[in-house]
Amino acid sequence: MEQLEKDLGEEEGPGERGLLHTWKGYSCSVKPQRVLGLGSKTVLQAALGTRHGVILTEGGEVYSFGELPWRQGSANPAPVPILEQALIGQRVVAVAAGSFHSGAISEDGTAYMWGENSSGQCGVASKNVVPDPMAISIADRETSPPQQIRIKQLACGEQHTIALSVHCEVWAWGSGCQLGLVTSVFPVSKPQKVEHLAGRRVLQIACGAFHSLALVQRLPSQEAKLIPDKCNHCNQLLITMTDKEDHVIISDSHYCPLGMELTDSEQRQGSPVQKLRRSPSEPSLGSTVTEPSGKDSPTVVCRDEKDLGTTELPPEGKEMSEHSDRGNVKEPEPEAHGGVANQRVKNSPYPDEQAVKEYLKRLSDHSLAEQTAKNAQCPQAQDEPVDDDPVPPPTTVSSSLNSLVVSYASAVGVKVASTYEALSLKKVMSYYYPPPGGCPVPAEGLKETREGQVRLEESMQGKKSSSLGDIREEEAEGVSRRLSLPGLLSQVSPRLLRKASRPRMRTVVLTPPFGSEADAYLPSLQTEVWSWGRGKEGQLGHGDILPRLQPLCIKSLSSKEVIQVASGAHHSLALTAQSQVFSWGSNNSGQLGHMELPSTMPRLAKMSEGIRVWDIAAGQEHTLLLADGDCFQPILYYSGKQVSQEGSSPQTNGVYTQQPVLLPFCMNLGYVSSVFSGGQSCLALADRNVMGYIASLHELASAERKFYCRLSSIKSQILRPLLGLENLCTALGTASSLLLQTMASRFSKLCYLTGQHVASLNLFLHSTKEVKGLRMLEHSVIFVDIYKEYWRTVGDFLVMGGFQALVKPSLDFFGKSPELLQRLAETNDESVPFSDLLLALFDLPIRHLHEYGRVLLKLATCFEVSSADYQKLQDGSSKYEALAIHLKRKRKEAEYTYHFWKTFPGKMTDSLRKPSRRLICESSNKALTLQSAGRFSVNWFILFNDALVHAQFSTHHVFPLSTLWVEPISEETSGVYGLKITSPEEQFSLLASSPVEKAKWLRAINQAVDQDLNGCPDFLMAGSGSVQRPEPPISRTAKYTFYKDSRLKEATYEGRWLAGKPNGKGVLKWQDGRMYTGTFKNGLEDGFGEYIVPNKALDKEDHYQGHWKEGKMHGYGTYKYATGEVYEGSFQDNMRHGHGILRSGKLTSSSPSMFIGQWVQDKKTGYGVFDDITRGEKYMGMWQDDLRQGNGVIVTQFGLYYEGAFSSNKMIGSGILLSEDDTSYEGEFIDDWTLNGKGTLTMPNGDYFEGTFSGEWGTGLKVAGTYFKPNLYDTDKEKTETLKLGVLAVAPDEKWRAVFDECWSHLGCESPGQGENWRAWENIAVALTTSRRQHKDSPEIMSRSHNKTLESLEVIPQHVGPVTLEKYENIRKYLIKACDTPLHPLGKLVETLVAVYRMTYVGVGANRRLLEQAVNEIQSYLKRIFQLVRFLFPDLPEEGSVIPVPSAASHDKRPHCEEETDCRPESTESGRLVSSSGLLLPVLLPRLYPPLFTLYALENEREEDVYWECVLRLNKQPDLALLNFLGVQQKFWPVCISDLGENKKVLPSTKNICFASAVESLQQISTTFTPTDKLHVIQQTFEEITQEVLSLLKNDFLWSMDDLFPVFLYVVLRARIRNLGSEVHLIEDLMDPSVQNGEQGIMFTTLKASYYQIQHEKIT
């Protein structure tokens, strides 16, 4: 050894990281050599071929060494590594080596290949050798254009190469079936995708000489395909059953001639014999079955009982029993088992005993020797098998066969019972599993041990994959099988089955579900190994020696958590997260690490107890393992052929290991981080321990591996057996059983995370080892959450007494001696109670957290305090340490609570004990009493983490903490140490015995309330600096169910609270289905809210949405009744009160109608409009108590019009009735449409009756009176004056008073004009702000511009002092904005007025008789809104006043209102005229225009028809003819017209060209709304005419009316305005009176004259 160290020291040179050592074989004379020629460069990775290797150094440089025959002109072998010049500057990140070729991957994902290429393995066509690295193009040709594939890993075989892309897909090139491609043409020189793995996530790849391996992430169970009944390729049945007279033969020996089966049955071909395990730490891969010889298929033969007793052992069984002595293994014939050579075997596990002794001395305190001594005391822990085969426990066999039968019986279903009874499993068992002597013995004579049961449990639960071992797995996965069972089986009692396994077991799934949060950041453990290629040596692991042309899953490794695969020339290795190594394939030199046969299935390599492997490498005929021993410096194990050294004795030739042996020199290499093998060589990549950093990293990883193995043992040996017990539910009770299952599930999740972390740390140690790569620091939140979640379930189980209840079933199962539990819990104290032992097991993870904290702190000390790495490690350490302390505190709380429940009176325990409830403090020592309690009363106060309980004798009351408020009572005023407790329905005072007790309870309650509200307070994270609040917030969110309050009894409220009362947003639900969602104030509904009331009779619900006040509907809202009615409007004290609209029914229902108007205490009272859609009538008038009462108007769809008095809902009293043809009656009425009394009936032609009338209109009238026929020459002026409509209708100012009153009340005025101006503005600002808050969640309601409008409206305009023109303009702009948003009181008023106006005058209301009332109504609106405006702007002058123009701005008035002049009609010479129409019509009229203009059109229909006929006739004439006809002077006739810049002459035939611009201007009159805008259009038309005439006459010119009128008449005719009469009348009715005598007034008169002229125009 000294000599070895010296050799190493001589070669080492500078460098502390990435030191590469090489050697061959395993004898103690081996001296590892430093690979020379790299200078001080750090090696990152290496790879070995048969006789060469490649090295990757930091900086991305690649070196080749060994025999390089493809390199021309270089020595062979190369004396020192040679730099590959072609790769300089490519930043290589990974290298690979095949038997005789090499590969590299650059940073951008490009693959480079060089070396031997005779089989196309370098991906280059038509070249036998590739001397220098060449870039290989890997492109997906299915995409257009072909997409270049980026590569992250290469693996090379002898004649092939496979690559793993960044998208986790496999690409292959070269020759042979090991490519996995669907092709028979070789070589494949262009890389192709291995389609058979498409859709799966491949994690890693490896190549043997002629086979390939892939580590693949398992698909989630729902994506996994169901196994079919028939082979996908040859369509034969996969499992056959043959019915014989006295037995059943079950066979699954299907062999697919295509050699690439995809079901799990192919791995049963040639089923191997598997030995039972010797210890719990060595999981078996399945039940033992016989091995077939020759063509015989494996069968399970179930014979009749009489036969079973006497049947001889089958020949295969005999053969195997001869080989059963493990110390004396016979080598099988070469042909049978892949050519295993007959070589001399050396039995010693170590080549040199002396070397071992030296190694043991150098190990740390926990030496192997001590470990061995420990193992001797504890036989269960022995991993090394004894020489004699122990008798297999009967439970193993019976349970395995039991599972076989169950699976088949469950598939048939009907014959379950007969199947059970038909098979006497004890006899079957003794038939198949004879003791070493080979004769059947009675099963009852076999010794049952606890250890055997644990082994049984583990073998049952793991899904094992041998030829028949998969059946249990398939049963669990619900795979249906086709089979037949005979009905003639003998009746045997199934009790025999139960005896075989004393505690009955159930299958328990403890695997975490797919897609956990950690999967995104940590390696997955849910993996599968797929293999393909040649299988002659069994290297594919499918239990046979067949080749596979396409990848096939090795089922037996699917549940083994494989994290790494490696391939030697003809053998394969798989490393699991539990640090175990499975090996299969050629074992001619012991390279599999065990001597069990056959080697065609994965088996565990034989490692000593406590040795955990974490890196694997395989060469030609050897395996190299990197492992942890008892110290954390890694150790190396070698398994395989001894390489003969130069000068060695010939006795070493052909020597090989039977199991992995320790390489004695490994301690001298430093801290090895990776191993590589190839050919006969080995490489180890090591680091020196600088500043302790490397050692600490290895310590962290080693501790994690050890911890994961322990967790896995607890899961498989403790948890799974316990959960599988059938009597568990009885022993624990349902609640505790569920808690145990939850705890087991969380334990599994924690176990899985730890396994993922192990895999992550392994990868970390193989990498550059930078602190930022530590996942436990980057994603600590995942670790913290899973630990906290886990410990919460342990605490819950502990509180409910679960561990005590678990003692009995545990003792029944594990026996009285708890050695296994003590070993796993790491305790030697035998006096520890069994329940504490169980708790200690589940407390292990918490103890491990301290380990995290300690090692991270140790790592931090390797860095400068100011560095980022130091800070990161320091924070991580603090975080895990704080978590450990936090969870310890949680454990104490749980234990305190458990002990409390043991002393608490029984009856109350049942109702109060909950898993998540923890005790904080209680007053059994009389420290706290109820104020004013009786002398003999017992008051016990118990504070839990979720409630304060007041217990008295046999009763108790629970006060949830979320709705509990506590405040101290002042000692000065009361003289006692008191606390005032407030809950939603009760208030009481507690007296403490001392100030200390008072402070203790006050703090305890406040903290408990705060924790209950904010969730459990997290432990203080490093640097978070959060401080416990002195007291919880007085305002909070909580849920509560009322139990006393009469109005709210049994109702549940969830929402905001303030000092014991609901306050803020919340939801209140009653048990009868009523529900309120909205805002509360002081315990009552107040503000905006929704209310639902079920209507059981109709099976529907009433729904109110609107405002509330003091628990009642108050303000604006919408009420949808279950009957289908909808009311929208004002409420007061839960009643409809104020203005509102009620829609009843739909058009198809019995009485659809609509009422809009005033309500008083739920009844229609005041002015309102009722639209009876069914009868086609509309009433507009006064109401009282839901009845029509007072003056009103009715119009019908048939054109009838009535105005007059109503009483008790009927037309009673005097009234006027007009029909469509102008027949009218004026007189007395007694009922709807029923005349009775004096009256006058006038015919359309002017004839009339005077007298008394009776009868219903339209059905025949009785008349007693006089008939008058007016003289033809008499004028009927007097008559028409008497029939003035509107006199008996409701006065315009009386209409919609409720709407205006509501607007005044919103401004804070009790009646119009009575209130404070400042308060009004304040109310407007409040209304806008609250509305904006309410609507901020609804972007569709609030556009950005709308939001800006609201913001500008919240600013109160300055309006103090006399109003100037500028201020007037600002007021006008403010009003336009205010009326534009319904959230402003004025905007709401305008919106409501528009709604009621349309409701009145649309539909049946579009009656020409209503025109005058409609106009008067608009004028009334203007007057009343103007009153509101003057209230808001008190300095605004009265209607008709003039705002003077500042003297500087005065100017001469120009004709025709040219540019500088304000063309507004309300502007006069001296200033601006203030008028309601000028200020408000622009806002109001555009919205009221459609119904109003319709009424004008109906009223003027006849005269407009005459006018239009004349317009159409006259427009047929050409321009000049029409000008001539109208008498336009010839000097005004245009001669030339400019059309698009061209001057065109006006010909006699020219049409529609003269005065075209004036015509276009006048046509705009139909697109405007207000009289002002229409007058402006007329004025523009005159200006256009003037401009055209001026251009003709070329000099100044003044119009006379005689000249102007014919020209204007021409323009009006050519403009063809259809409803010109309506336009004229609208302007006339609504224009500002001050305009009538001005310039615009004259122009309007001209237009009006033109209209009448056209009607009476005669064409001669």
Image: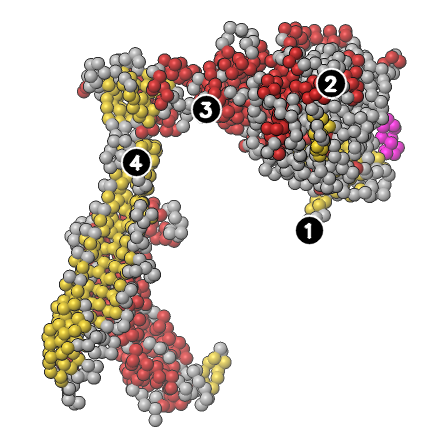
Q: How far apart are marks 3 and 2 (CA)?
A: 48 Å
Give the residue pinned by disc 3. Answer: 734
Q: Which of 1 and 1217 is in front in this view?
A: 1217
Nearer to us of marks 3 and 4 is 3
Q: Nearer the viewer, residue 1210 or 173?
A: 1210
Indicate yes or no whether the magenta region holds residue 1197. Answer: no
Q: Are the residues at dot 1 and dot 2 in contact (C-beta closer than 8 Å)?
A: no
Give the residue pinned by disc 2. Answer: 310
Nearer to us of marks 2 and 4 is 2
Rendering coords of residue 1531 (x, y %): 37, 88
Give the residue pinned by disc 1. Answer: 144
In the rendered structure, which disc, 3 or 2, sits on the residue that comes first in sequence?
A: 2
- Count neighbours of disc 2 (C-alpha within 10 A) and say few if under 14, some if 14 to 19, many if 20 or more: few
Rendering coords of residue 733 (x, y %): 45, 21
Label 3 sits on what residue type?
A: Thr
Label 2 sits on what residue type?
A: Thr
- Count neighbours of disc 3 (C-alpha within 10 A) and say few if under 14, some if 14 to 19, many if 20 or more: few
Nearer to us of marks 1 and 4 is 4
In the rendered structure, which disc, 1 or 4, sits on the residue that comes first in sequence?
A: 1
